[in-house]
Structure formats: structure tokens, C-alpha cells
Amino acid sequence: MTSYDLILAAVAGAVCLAICVTLWSLGQRRGYEARIAALKARLGLQGGEPLDAPAWVEAFDTAVIAVEGGRADLAAGADGLSACARVLGVEAKVEAVIAALSGADPDHAHKLAALFERGEACVFEVRGGNGWVSVEGRAVGALAWLRLMPGSGGDSGLPSATRFAAFVDSVAEPAWIAGADGQAVWGNAAFVRAVGASVASAGALAGKSFDRSADALVVEAVEKGERREAVRWINLEGRRRAFRLSAQPLEGGGVGVFCADVTEIEDVRDAFKKHVEAHDETLNHIAEAVAIFSATRRLSFHNTAFAELWGLEPAWLADRPTHGEILDRLRQRRRLPETIDYAVWKAAELARYEDVGPQADDLWHLPDGRTLKVVRQPHPLGGMLLIYSDITGELRLKAQYNALIQVQQATLDKLNDAVAVFGSDGRLRLHNEAFETFWNVSAFALEAAGDFEGVVELCVPRLHDLAFWRELKGRVADPDPQMRAPTSGEVRTSDDRIVVYQSRPLPDGATLIAFADVTDTRDLQSALADRSAALAEAERLKRDFVGNVSYELRTPLTTIIGYSELLERADGISERGRNHVAAVRAAATQLARSIDDVLDMAQIDAGEMALEIGDIRVSDLLLNAQEHALKDAQLGAVTLAVECEEDVGLIRGDGKRLAQTLDHLVENALRQTPPGGRVTLSARRALGEVRLDVSDTGRGVPFHVQAHIFDRFVGRDRGGPGLGLALVKALVELHGGWVALESEPGAGSTFTCHLPETQQPGAMQPELSF
């Protein structure tokens, strides 16, 4: 079968269903019309007389009126109609009674009109001069029915069952009637919604329960035969709510149960309980001892510090002793202030309960040396709140603080600088005697001035610059971190003094301001600067003189050395003459070297010597030094040896200057070593440096000379080597290293040059250094 066939079949089924429903509706309508026609016929046959009615209608003074098409007829209960007419004070006729019901209240007229015209059911009561009439209206087909029931006497204030049921239904909280087994037989609308039933009938409520605890409460009320109440937390409509359940046995059987929603009250109670617990917990964590006594003077609360302060047993305190009993126990243990008459003191202490106003604090000096501060305050709920604070340490710290302030004041008074300390509020806290002398003011005037502005007024006669004082005030009172930064400077006073000032923020927010008269210091500095300039000029002239003289001496020395070499090679000169010429050439050569050393020292002092840095093989450096000094060693019958480790490798430095350094050290060693001795050149690498050693087996250096061995221009008559070792020290330091001496008189000497593997900042050319 295709989808099209399915659609046709569905449409056909729907059409058939619609036809069937239409036919059924027509049949029902015809049945209703036939019943209405029969009722109309019966009314016509009775001729306006009441229809046959059940006996209970007459027994209960109930009247039933049928209304159709604006016509009202008494269907049953003529006596009931008469009773209703008497209550309303009208004639015992249907029209008169209905008119009285409509005229009693506009709302009643509106409800009756809605019943007669649209068939809307209604229930209401009408008050009359002799009681009340309960009216209930219903519509069946085209007829509207009214049931009237009069009430009078003792029941005149009671609503009808229907009205009372409507009243109970309007209550927002669940209410119901239960049997002896706790099973609900009727409930209001809130109860029906709570248990998930459809209507408030016993059948619909069977097996339904608002809460098991409520059912148990009903059974308990039945067994005890008295009202029972309890608060239960129940989940209702997805929310946990608290209800106060009241179960009251009813006259004639059953139990009436009413629920009052006390969720907010329970929440407030729980919050209050938590607040009290938190309050107690907070008091238990503070250091002060707290005790609260009730209006009956019994201990109602105490924190942990209270029991610890007085050393009282927690179990005894839990029995809630009176204030007097606590005082008695403390007196027995000598923990109260010593008094002449304890009874009078105790009576005065307990009499404070009668004073409801604020009470002054008190100090207790205990026999064990402690001092307590006692604070008393009337409690809002009656009784008294007492707080005991152990201020022994506070008093000790206060005494220490006062002593510290006195020490600070005495210290400031011993200073030559004028010092004043201002608080963050601008008030003058401290000042020394030098401050009074410096500004020519008295201590009384400063105390009367009080703040920074007042102090400025006293100081302005000697320092007129108001801008300076405004800037200084900002350092004292302005909370800006930039203004709180330390500052210093110089100012000149009206009496031509130079004053140095400085301000320093203190940790407590105060500001220290100090003034110092530096007039003499500045004058001395000026004189020293002039003297330094003169010395620098003299040093420059000396350096220029030495340089010029050295250059002037080098020219004739070159001539002397040249002619002496020619004379040594000339013919016809005797051996003695040749020796004299050789001595002249050696002396001239030595003098030339000394002049070169002087020029090198002058360059180093002037910072004009630039090193030509490169890679140098250490072994070649030692061998070259050996080669240069080998002839002199042979002449002096001294062995000159080289000991170099294979892994020494290369070093960064100026080869010419390092060779010059070794030449001077070897020359010094040969001069100090007697014939048959030994001079050793060695090198080793260790800890990021290269060590060059020149050792000899000579007579050594005396201890009193070792401290000055590297000084410049040490004379030979004092055992010094002259300028050579001073130049050695300068050249090694220029490479970023240092030189050391190890010597024992009579056992030789060892000079060690410590050179870095790589060029150090000290070895850089002056124009390239930073």
C-alpha cells in the first residue's frame, strides 16, 4: 500500500468519526429536549404547586426553586420557603424571596443573573433580620435550580458546610481530615495539590500521604485523645519547607490536621543559632577573657580565655556559678586585688548590676604581678558583660617605648646637625638642641608652634625662600609616594651660610628633616680643589720634564753606544782599551734601558700606553727570554733553565710588553744569584689563569724590603732593584693580572706573574674602555 492510499484511508476514517460524533450529539440533544418537555408538562399539571419531593427536603426546611425562561417555580419545600421568607422579612412567595436575595447585595444579584442567563453555579449567604439564608445554585440543561436553607438561633454565626469548605480551600497551607489510621478522608485544595490527587474525596485520597511523620502525629493524637503539634521539614513542590503540624481530634470522630508554613521562622531561628555559635566561636578565639552574667548574676557564657586567665575548672564553670561564687573562689586562690575589707569590695563589685549606665574601666593589680584592665558593660538581655585584658606586657612595652623615646631624644641632642621629626599630620614630634641653636629659636617657641607651619614662621627670618618651605612641606604632609621619596639639597641663608638639608621618610609615616651648616666645609673643599689642580699641574710638568729629559738623553746615548761599538771593532786598540770601550758601551746601554723604563712608566701614569693584544705561545715567550739573557748568565756562571708544561698553550696579551716583563725579572734574578747558582723560568695553567714564575737560588730579599720591592725608584743602597720591578708590576696589572713575591733570606726568591687566560678590562686600550 502506498503513502497516498494511507492518506486516503486516514481521511475517510476522520470523516466517519465526525459523522458518528454528530449523530451521537443529535441523539443526546433530543433526549435532553424530551426530558425538559416532560418536566414542563409536570409543572403545568401541578398548576404551580410544588412537585413531589423527597421527605428529607421537608424535614430540613429546605426549599428548591426551578427557574426557566425568567419564570421561577417552587419545586419542593414549601415550609422551607416560608422559613426563608421569615428570615428575609418578605412574603412567602417565590418571586418575593428571589427579589430579596437579589436586593440584599449587588454581588448576589450578579451571581443570580449569571446563573439564570449562563448557567454559572453560585454559592453565597444572605443575612436577614432573623438569621441567614444559605443559597446554592446549579444549572441542569435549560433549568436553573436554587436550593435555599434558612439558619437562625445559635447557628446564626456559623457558615454552611459548602461555605466553610470554600473557606478552607482558600487557605494556602495544606489542611485535611484524617481517620483513626492516619489516612486522609478529605483535604483542601492545597492538600490535594500537595499529595497529587485529582479531587478531595476519600476515594481519590486513598493511599495518598502528605508526610509519614504527619500520619504518625495523627495516630498519636488519636491514641492520646488530645492535640499534638510538631515541626517537620517536608519536600513540597521541589523545595524543602518547614511546617508546624497541628493534629486535633474532632467531635464525632476523625482528626483535623492543619499545617502552618514556618520555613522563614525556622530559617531565622537557624540563622540566629548559627550567629550565636559564630559569636561564641569568635569570642573563644580572642585573647581577652570574656564572661557574660545573666540578670540573676549567674554565669551564662564564658570563652576559653576566661577559664585560662583565672585557672578555673571547665566542669565547675559549666554548672553556671554566680558572680559572687566566682569571686570567692578567686579570692581563695589569691587571684584578686588585695583589699583591706573583701566583703565591702565584693559588695561594691556586685552592686554594679544595679547601674544600667556606662561604667568606667578599672585596673586590677594582682598579687602575681599581673595587671588586668576590667571593662564592664550592661548586657542588652539583662545582666552584665565583663572583659578582662592582661595589659602587663602592654605596660612593659609602653615603659620601654618611653625609655626608647628618651634615648632617641638624648641621641639627637648629641648630634651637631639640626634634626626635627614631623608626623604625617604635620605635628612636630621631636627636635634636638642643635635645631634650636641652628634657627635661633627657643624650645618653648617650638612647642607653642606645634605644627610645620608654625615652625616655618620661626625659621623664615633666617631663610626667606618660601618656595623651599612649600617643597619641604610636601615631603612631610603629601601622601603621594613620589613626594615621600628621600631628597636633599643646598640652600643659602640670609646670613650667607651654606646649608645642606635632607628629608627621610620614616617607617611610621613620620618625616625626618636635618639641616647642617657646611660653609666651612665648602670653603675647605674649594681650597682642596685649588690645591689638587695645582698638584695635577705640577705632576703634568714633572711628567713632561721627565719625558723631555729622557728624549734629550737618548740622542747622545745613541751616539755613545754607536761609537763604542765602532771602537770595539777598530784595529790597533789594546786589549785593555777594548775592555774600557766595552764598559762604556754596557753602561750606555744600561742607561738607555733605564730611560726607556722611565718613559714607559710615564706613559702608564698618563694612561697613554695601549697594548697590542694577540695570541702568544707561552713556551716561545719563555724561550725568547732565555735567549736574551743567556749571554749574561754565562758571564755570571749562572745556569738559566726553562720548565714549561706541554698543556700551557696560548695566552692573550701584548707579546712585547710580556717579554719586557720577563727580561726585567730574569735580569733581577741573575743579579741576585751568585756564580754556580740557578735561575729557572717556568709556566703553568691553573684556575683560569697562566702563572709565569722566575725563580733563583740567590741571596733572597730581606723581609723589611719585601713590602717595598715593587715601589718605584727604590735605591740600590736599600737593597731594591731600581725601576724594573715597579714596571713589571705596572705591566702585569695592565694585562689584568697581578704579581707576587715569595722569598726567604738566603734561600732565593720566586716572582710569579698571574695572568688571565683572556684579556681583562684592565688590558683594553684606554680609548676603547668604558
Image: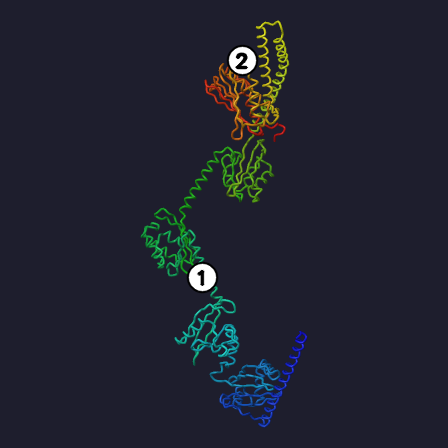
In the image, which disc is placed on residue 695? none
Quick one: quadrant of the C terminus? top right
Report x, y in % for residue 84. Answer: 53, 87
In this rendering, the answer to whether 463 lies above or below 337 is above
Query: Residue 729 falls in which quadrant of the image?
Result: top right
Q: Amino acid at mark 2?
A: Leu
Q: Nearer the viewer, mark 2 or mark 1?
A: 2
Q: Residue at x 55, y 17 (%)?
A: 629
- Is disc 2 placed on a helix, strand or loop? helix
The residue closer to the viewer here, 739 or 233, is 739
Does 496 sit left or right of 337 as displayed?
Answer: right
Tag 2: Cα neighbours inside 10 Å, few (<14), some, or many (≥20)?
A: few
Q: How many marks?
A: 2
Q: Residue at x 51, y 41 (%)?
A: 506
- Residue that label 1 marks: 273
The answer to which of marks 2 and 1 sits earlier in the sequence is 1
In the image, which disc is placed on residue 635? 2
Marks 2 and 1, Cα distance to the nearest angstrom? 113 Å
Query: Residue 48 falls in which quadrant of the image?
Result: bottom right
